[in-house]
Structures are given as structure tokens and as C-alpha cells.
Image (cartoon, rainbow, N blue to C red):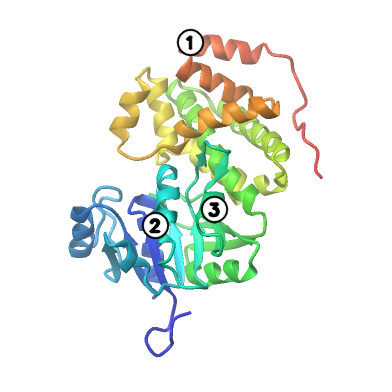
Amino acid sequence: MSDSNSFAGYRVAVLGGGSFGTAIANIVADNGHAVSLWLRSEERALEINQTHENPVYLPGVPLNPNLKATTDLSQAVAGVDIVFVAVPSKSSREVSRTLAGLLTENCILVSTTKGIEADGFKLMSEVIHEELPRARLGVMSGPNLAKELAEREITATVIASSDSGVTEAIQTLLQCSYFRVYASSDTYGLELGGALKNVYAICAGMAAALGAGSNTISMLITRSLAEMCRFAVKKGADPMTFMGLAGMGDLFATCTSPLSRNYRVGFALGQGRDLNDVVAELGQVAEGVNTLRILKEQAEQLDVYMPLVNGLYDIIYNRKSLDDVVAGMMGAEQSRDVDFSLR
């Protein structure tokens, strides 16, 4: 906590000026805490500070005037109690490495990035820990579509950490009338669920573009959850974590909403558009595109049955027709509905 004589609350930095980072910083400011939003664009930082809006990522959403944007990383994190890391996965290691030597001794770091580093199949908290081994770490995930969050629509999230002080601090920091924060100790399972669901959101977007009915979408989401749980068990995570907000909750939100970047990628692919054109037009990172390659390779190494992952990979990278892939999956040998064992 900060010195109560100077500020009666937490001092917070949010790294990443995209839609989610901006939304989290706005909640912090609304709750009366000092917050700096770090981003790379001088132009966007100036716009946020002058107009109290992030017109690139959250157009039309008013931001708390006390939210201050900066492009100076050392200034943003100087003396802060809590840092949220909300940068794209490809930047997480670089940013974490830069933070070395800039943070106070008991500073809490919370990873919100839902991605995987290919080298060693490392989740973002593992990347952060490698670069900042003494940091107090937490992971946050849930059905948190940034635009709805920024517009103060009711939702909830989960903060996971082996350090109960971390979970308690984040619950205190973010809890408000429209945002409920639950705690968990399953950091790995929580983070894994957040990364995996992006792949299935692409599948769901494709299905929606092709006019799939409610039965089809329901089957797709539940079979996606089954695949995620099979993989989670193989990786040593608790499959029960996937029954909660950070699993089923996040999966449902991203598989049914056009606000999800990964869903929009899938929808465009279902319309027959080229992947590179879609990603370029999106202008934001769709983590599922990167995760798909990494997940398929890891599933093959671990011998985990993941037909949806294999099918999507064949469509995107092997140029197989959607009809052929669907026919192959529907004609495959039938297995049990729920086929993993609780430990």
C-alpha cells in the first residue's frame, strides 16, 4: 500500500494500451486509486490524456479523467504497488525483462495476457517469472470482453495466485458494483484456460458465418470444453477450474460474441477470406491464431485427442475444405462424452 499521508489507496500501473488494458486501468481509476497506463504510442497517450478516450481501441467510451497515460515505462512503474501486464504475448518477455530493476521489492505483478510462448510451451506468468523471479505473481482471467467491461456492464473475473496476499489485494483493488472478483489458487489451470479458449473462438466464429444453428453452436462449445479439459489434465492442471468463470465462462463469452477478436477472425474465415488479410484488417492481436500452431504441436507430443484443433489447423494451414474437415470429424469413431478422470 502507498503511504496514507500521500494517497489512501494503491498505486497501480497497467502495461498495454489496448482495449483490455485500458478497461482495467479505468476500473482502477473509478475505484479511486492512482493509475498510470503505459503504451508505446505518443499520439495515443496524448489523446487519452486530453480527450479521456482511447479512440483506437475503445471509441466512444469515456475514461476516468484520473487515468493518466504515458510512454515512459520507468515513470509508469515508479513506486507502484501493483502492475498489470496486458501486452500481447509476443511482447511479454521483452517488457518483463525491461521491468527488472524498476519495481519495488513487494510489488505485485498480474498477468492478463492469454497467450503461449512457443519455446517450451510457456504461459505468460511463467515468462514473467523467468525474467522477474522475485515478483509476487498473479493471473487474472474470465469472461471479460473489454468493451463491455469498459461500459460498466456486470461481469466477474478470477484472480489466481499461490500468494493469498496477491488475491486479496486484487479483489480489494478491482471489486465494484459491476465487477466481481473471485479468488483461486490454480494459477496454471486458470491461465491455460484463457489461452486455449481463443482457438475455439475461431472455430465458433467460422460456424456462425456459415449459419450454424443453436444445436451446432452448443455442441461446438461443449466439445471444445472437453478438449480443453483433456489437455489440461495431461498438463497437470485441475480440470475443475475449467468449469468456472475462467474456463466455461470465458469460453462461452468468446465463442458467442462478435466483440471477441478471435471470433471475428473465425467469422471472416468462414466467409472465405484470407487469414493474413483478416489479421491485418483487425489491427489488434488475435492470440488464437498464434496459439493454434503451438497447441497442435504440443497435443501431438502429449498424444491428446483434439479433433477441433486438428480440424481448424487443417483448414487454416493445410488449405483443406471445411466440408471435408467436418465430414471427417462427424464420421470419426464415437467416444465418451466426458472422458477425463478427476484426480
Q: Is residue 208 left or right of residue 76?
A: right
Say which residue label 1 marks: 321
* Sequence-first tag of 3 and 1: 3
**Which residue: 59% across, 33% down?**
221
Q: Secondary structure at mark 1?
A: loop
Q: Secondary structure at mark 3?
A: helix
**Which residue: 62% across, 61% down?**
161
* Sequence-first tag of 1 and 2: 2
Q: Are marks 3 and 1 in contact (CB under 8 Å)?
A: no
Say which residue label 3 marks: 130
Mark sitting on residue 78: none
Q: Are marks 1 and 2 in contact (CB under 8 Å)?
A: no
Mark sitting on residue 98: 2
The picture quadrant where one finds residue 10 is: bottom left
Q: Is residue 285 left or right of residue 59?
A: right
Classify 216 as above or below 252: above
**Residue type, label 3:** Glu
Q: Quadrant of the C terminus?
A: top right
